[in-house]
Image (spheres, rainbow, N blue to C red):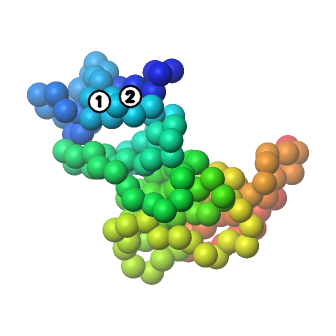
Amino acid sequence: MTKDGQVYGCGDTYYIENSVDNDVHIPQHIYKLSQYNIKQVSCGFYTSLFLSASGQVFIATLFTIQPVKVVDPIYSIACGDNCWFLVSETGAVYAFGSPAYGQTIFAEEKRVPEKITAFHTPIKNVACGNNFTLFLVGRIELTSKIYLFDGHFADIEFYF
């Protein structure tokens, strides 16, 4: 990603418009996003999320990039293993995708983002791994509270 919000990709990049094949070793410009000022990118298992400076979200899947429709302006994004999370400017969290390991909190697959209503405090950020999701509450301090969700909530405090 460049400082003016242009995105380049390489590797197993099915969504690069001008690729001859999907095994790209030299970064190539992702032209479909060139009209947006992209400020954050998150890569998952054969998918990627892109967040523009205006809060728009785009998802790249096999051979396509399309907008993700959400009511609230989005502040932060994260990709897991076939699941995706969006954090709004107000701290609301939206999830969609596969709940194979319980990481989306929903019992069935969601094709569009759905708000997670289990949080009683605004979420500041989200990060995903293969089979889990972490939600950051508040600002990072010497002690920070993080919610871990892998099918069950765990309230964890970290001491640095």
Callout 1 touching callout 2 (CB < 8 Å): yes
Which residue shows up at 66% across the image and 58% down it? 90
Q: Mark 1 points at which residue?
A: 30
Q: Where is residue 57 drawn, in percent x and y?
A: 43, 48
Q: How far apart are marks 1 and 2 (CA)?
A: 6 Å
Give left or right: position of 105 versus 32: right
Q: Mark 2 points at which residue?
A: 7
Asked which secondary structure carries label 1, the reply is loop
Q: Is 31 situated above or below 142? A: above
- Comparing 119 with 53, the one in front is 53
Which residue shows up at 27% across the image and 35% down it? 32
- Comparing 134 with 61, the one in front is 61
Quadrant location, the N terminus: top left
Q: Where is residue 42 drawn, in percent x and y?
A: 46, 43
Asked which secondary structure carries label 2, the reply is loop
Quadrant location, the C terminus: top right
Q: Where is residue 111 drawn, in percent x and y?
A: 34, 68
Give left or right: position of 86 versus 23: right
The amino acid marked with disc number 2 is Val
Which residue shows up at 16% across the image and 28% down it? 19
Give left or right: position of 35 versus 41: left
